[in-house]
Amino acid sequence: MATSSPNHAQAPALIELHTTGSHELGNSLSDPNTDVNPGHSTASAAIPLELTFARKLKLISALLCFFNCGVNDGSLGALIPYILRTYNISTGWMAIPYGVTFLGWLIAAFLGGYGRIVLGSGGMIIFGGAVQLLAQCFRPWVPPFSLFSVTFFLVALGQASQEPQCNTFVSRLKNAHRWLGLLHGCYAIGGLTGPLVAAAIASHSPADWAYFYLVPMGFGVVNLGLSCYTFRDETTYYQKRGPRPSNAGSSSSQRRSAAALVEFKATIKQKSVWLLSIFFFLYLGAAITAGGWVVEYLATVRHGSLSRVGFISAAFYGGLAAGRFALAEPTFRFGEKRMFLVYAIMSLVLQIIFWRVPNVIVDSTQVMISLMGFLLGPAFATGISVGSKLIPVELQPSGLAMIFVMAQAGGAIFPAITGVIADSAGVSTLQPILVGLLFAMAISWMLVPDPKKLLI
């Protein structure tokens, strides 16, 4: 019997969970002697949470977290031409910052489950904010390229610690599809703000382009402070301030490690996690490649002036922001699977036109890039909304962490490959790479199950 109820849609995934041998996870989570504190049982966690005042503050903190990440990620495309010229390196060298970004997300994926058990979900959010702030403190002084690249690892580690926890929190709120659209819309607004500010600073004084990083440093201070205040009650320190048994040390550490391992094994057995991971791998690969290399492409291949085309990447992120806000509700109402497939095909057509019709006129290029961003905008909120209905509730934090690391893998690998290929074959290779990525993304989305059509 087909059903469209979100709660019923999770039943097949929950049945699959118990048939894959992860019943041990439920036992470890419910053991009163273990240090795992999921906060809710599976049944109660599936009930949407009302937006109380405390949760409103947490929502604001999560929105700022994503905005801060967007400012950092979106600015790189506008700064790449200045980075290449300051460090006197070729495009192939940009594979290093992108590569260490993936490394940061990969390490967080493997250690995130244990970190969440040790620190709590709130502790992971606070840790992530602190690590990002540390990284931003190095950047304004134009450190050696090796240290500059290390900051990308630290930022990725911090984002990977914050974003899955914030996504999980927001996905459990009432009318989650709207709040997820707002959450990822804030990331896109950050992605719009970052390149606008970066391009303005760099074009005004090219030698001082790195001063831009004082901006995300300031946002990082606010992000860390607000996270500490709003999510402190979800840290293990806050929850366990009372006296503990004298023999709790080694045994609790063993229980934490065992619970994290069981959770990880149960997560990788979920088919929906892998299918969504492939989709996000291709989606973010296309989005970051487009936003990261479009300025260098227009400056090198179509001979545009940096002072004029430096703002083009902001048009892409502006479109992302508009799409995430404007398309969240119609996408939900008319069917997430159907609607985003339409968006993906339309964005593919636009990319082919952009490739085959050479043009450096800023106005028309901005419109084209903005429309592509607009159509791709709902991808994250739509994918997370679908995932929250396909992935068992108790596995959503680890499942989202895995999906996010795969997404960031795409966001690191494909821009890096583009840079390496461009080093030998020219930046013009950006266009066929993007066409292939968008086509593969559309196919991968077709393979993701539709929660409304699952049988129970």
Image (cartoon, rainbow, N blue to C red):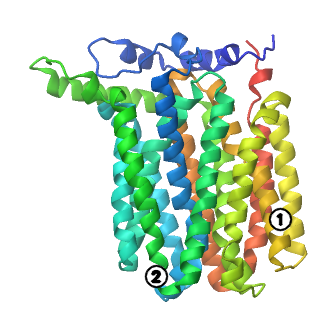
Q: How crowded is mark 2: few (under 14 residues within 10 Å), some or many (20 or more)?
A: some
Measuring from the top left, give residue 384's x and y in whole percent: 64, 36
As drawn, 253 above or below 215? above
Q: What is the quadrant of the C terminus in the image? A: top right
For badge 1, the amino acid type reads Val
Report which residue position mark 2 lands on.
Answer: 208
Q: Which of 122 and 9 is in front in this view?
A: 122
Q: Which of 389 and 24 is in front in this view?
A: 389
Label 2: element kind = helix
Measuring from the top left, give residue 234's x and y in whole percent: 36, 27
Q: How crowded is mark 1: few (under 14 residues within 10 Å), some or many (20 or more)?
A: some
As drawn, 46 above or below 233? above
Report which residue position mark 1 lands on.
Answer: 367
Q: Do the residues labelled 2 and 1 touch (CB within 8 Å)?
A: no
Instruction: State left or right for residue 395 relative to residue 228.
Output: right
Measuring from the top left, give residue 143's x and y in whole percent: 35, 77
Q: Residue furthest left?
A: 246
Q: What residue is rendered at 74% in x and 59% in y?
A: 437
Q: What residue is rendered at 34% in x and 38% in y?
A: 228
Q: What is the quadrant of the N terminus in the image? A: top right
Q: Residue 232's quadrant in the figure?
A: top left
Residue 109 makes an appearance in the image: no
Instruction: State left or right for residue 12 relative to residue 80.
Output: right
As drawn, 214 above or below 301? above
Label 1: element kind = helix
Q: Nearer the viewer, residue 227 or 414?
A: 227
Measuring from the top left, give residue 260's x and y in whole percent: 37, 30
For badge 2, the amino acid type reads Asp
Residue 364 makes an appearance in the image: yes
Q: Residue 274's quadrant in the figure?
A: top right
N-term-proximal mark, 2 vs 1: 2
